[in-house]
Image: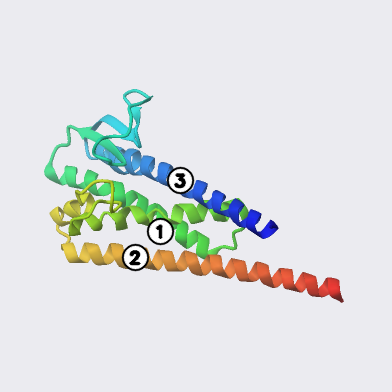
Amino acid sequence: MKRWRRAIAKGAVVCAALALSLIVGTVWHEVVGHGLVGVLCGGTIEYVDVLGVEFYPEFRWIGWPSGLYFGHCNVAGLPSGRAENLMSLGGSLSTWCVATIATCVLCVGKWRGWPAAVLAGLSLWWIDALSYTLPVWGLRKAVFWGSKYPEPYVAATALGCPGWLFQAIVISGSLLMAAGVLARLTGVRRERDGQLRANHGQDDY
């Protein structure tokens, strides 16, 4: 019975962490990836909403959008098509960079507890860029909901990157990050189980 309770508790924690990662990741994608990059490219942020909440120019609940998209950041006044493409690419590129850094930090350090949980959550942000490969094949970003517009793919190709190369980098990089985090977390679990067995052995002795 205790095992079931622990399993349910762990499952609840994982679900809560994933939900928080989705919310924070979407805010980062829109505000930092699109908004900040757009401002740096010469534009002005006019509007930001994430998961049904308007963040700017007012903070209020506006309801889940009919298009079932995760968020939107409107940047006006960009001086060129290149600037618009950089702003469009910035959303998924920003979460990709965070995921890459978090994965590297998690894999090279001996993290435990909440720091490891935070890094593991951030390392999942590669899902953002990977999910944008689906609209290229006619699916929605999250298969059943989300945008059908492959935003970073279109921006990358407009900036001169071959479409196949962009897809290959995103898919292979995502798989590598997922494998690295999984290997690290599996290693931590084995170390913990080994310590528990050693402690039980000392108690028996």
Q: Which badge, 2 or 1, is on the more N-terminal residue?
A: 1
Identified at 23% across, 34% down, the residue is 74
Q: Which residue is denoted by mark 3 in the rendering?
A: 19
Q: Residue furthest right?
A: 205
Q: Which badge, 2 or 3, is on the more N-terminal residue?
A: 3
**Secondary structure state at the residue bearing disc 3:** helix
Q: Are marks 2 and 1 in contact (CB under 8 Å)?
A: yes
- Seen from the viewer's position, the closer of residues 101 and 203 is 203
Q: Amino acid at mark 1?
A: Thr
Question: How would you rate the neighbour count of disc 2 (Cα within 10 Å): few for under 14, some for 14-19, many for 20 or more?
Answer: some
Up-down: is 70 above or below 118?
Answer: above
Q: Tag on residue 100?
A: 1
Up-down: is 195 above or below 121?
Answer: below
Location of residue 81 (image quadrant) = top left
Q: Which residue is denoted by mark 2 in the rendering?
A: 173
Q: Position of residue 12 (x, y in %)?
A: 55, 49
Q: Amino acid at mark 2?
A: Gly
Q: Which badge, 1 or 3, is on the more N-terminal residue?
A: 3
- Seen from the viewer's position, the closer of residues 120 and 35 is 120
Identified at 27% across, 46% down, the residue is 146
**Quadrant of the rendering where the C terminus is positioned:** bottom right
Q: CA distance from mark 2 to mark 3?
A: 23 Å
